Image: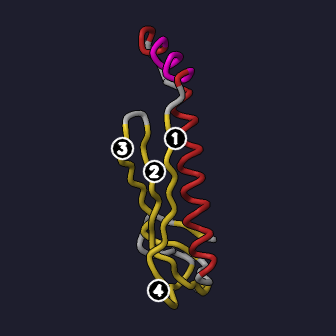
Amino acid sequence: MKLTTQDQFVDYEITETLDIVRGNTIRARHIGKDIMAGLRNLVGGEVKEYTKMLAEAREQAIDRMTAEAEKLGADGIVCLRFVTSPVMQSAAELLAYGTAVKLTKK
């Protein structure tokens, strides 16, 4: 499955636009990670616990979006975007969305 944030691929032609596809996940913070993040906040630097959590959430959202596109018979997804939103205190949704398309090599 080809993915891009652009509205087209350089080496492929879009032959059919299928539908909007999306994948999401909701992640809650962990008290142990919050304690480590709080300590790191005192000394400065990257909060690796949250960096890892967000990277995993992005990958899971992409996997779910890609699975939805594959069910439609898509070869690619264009205009890929990410959105985050709070769901409740200490939990947030990460949503990946784009347009599923069929492609042919130029």
- Which SS type dominates the magenta stretch? helix
Considering depth in this image, is 17 or 32 the residue closer to the camera?
32
**Mark 3 packing: few (<14 Cα in 10 Å), some, or many (20+)?**
few
Mark 2 vs mark 3: give the one in front: 3
Mark 2 vs mark 4: give the one in front: 2
Question: Disc 2 vs disc 4: Cβ atoms closer than 8 Å?
Answer: no
The numbered mark at residue 54 is 1
Considering depth in this image, is 87 or 22 the residue closer to the camera?
87
User: Mark 2 or mark 1, which is nearer the start of the sequence?
Assistant: 1
Residue at 41% x, 73% y is 7
Mark 2 to mark 3: distance in Å? Answer: 9 Å
Mark 3 to mark 4: distance in Å? Answer: 31 Å
**Mark 1 packing: few (<14 Cα in 10 Å), some, or many (20+)?**
some
Quarter of the view holding residue 97: bottom left
Q: Amino acid at mark 4?
A: Thr
User: Mark 4 or mark 3, which is nearer the start of the sequence?
Assistant: 4
Mark 1 to mark 4: distance in Å? Answer: 30 Å
Mark 3 to mark 1: distance in Å? Answer: 13 Å
The numbered mark at residue 94 is 2
Mark 3 vs mark 4: give the one in front: 3
Magenta range: 32-39
Q: Amino acid at mark 2?
A: Leu
Q: Amino acid at mark 1?
A: Leu
Numbered circles on residues, count: 4
Q: In x, y percent, where is residue 65?
A: 55, 66
Q: In x, y percent, where is residue 29?
A: 50, 32
Residue sitting farthest toward the bottom:
15
Task: Report helix, strand or loop for mark 4.
Answer: strand
**Which residue in the structure is indicated by mark 3?**
86
Compared with 66, 83 (above or below) is above
